Amino acid sequence: MNGSVDAWLWRKTYKGIAALGAALIIVLGAMALALGQASLSNKNGQQVETVSFVNVAVTPASFALHGGQYAVTVHATWGGGSLTLQRLAADGLTYVTCLTAFSADGYATVNLPPGTYQLTIATATAVYVDVTSVVVAS
């Protein structure tokens, strides 16, 4: 091949790799926004644990909770779908339901032991959900 063809091919390959890299950064950024786990202190110095998922339509990655009372707030485009909070069972494979499934926007509280959890999404889209520990003022 001559130099101009090689240079053209190199430019096309480089642009393709650059575009792929940019797409990967966007996807990773979206994943980072979709799952944010934070531990914050309130005015009494107590720890508040929050896990949030923003604009998701498929079951997101599992997450750990330290245990205690939690509040779950959900908003979504339901279209007949649902969202269920589930805990990983002792077999390490099976997720079991630990809160009645949401099929409409809502809020619920639940006492949970420490463990691995997931929010199972069926059909619903544009799901915005947070799981936040409830801190009782002393």
Image: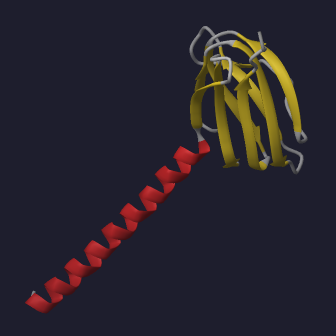
Whether residue 61 appears in this view of the structure is no
Whether residue 56 appears in this view of the structure is yes
- Vertical order, 88 against 81 (above or below): above
The image quadrant of residue 101 is top right
Q: Quadrant of the C terminus?
A: top right
Give the residue at x 81% y 17%.
110
In this view, the residue farthest toward the left is 2
- Vertical order, 53 against 4 (above or below): above
* Front position in the image: 43 or 90: 43
Where does residue 51 sit, x and y in percent of width and height?
Answer: 64, 32
Viewed as shown, does residue 133 lie left or right of 14? Answer: right
Count the labels in the image.
Answer: 0
- Vertical order, 23 against 57 (above or below): below
Viewed as shown, does residue 1 lie left or right of 44? Answer: left
Where does residue 95 sit, x and y in percent of width and height?
Answer: 67, 20
In this view, the residue farthest toward the front is 43
* Front position in the image: 46 or 128: 46
Q: Quadrant of the N terminus?
A: bottom left
Where does residue 66 sit, x and y in percent of width and height?
Answer: 61, 14
- Vertical order, 22 against 116 (above or below): below
Give the residue at x 47% y 50%.
28
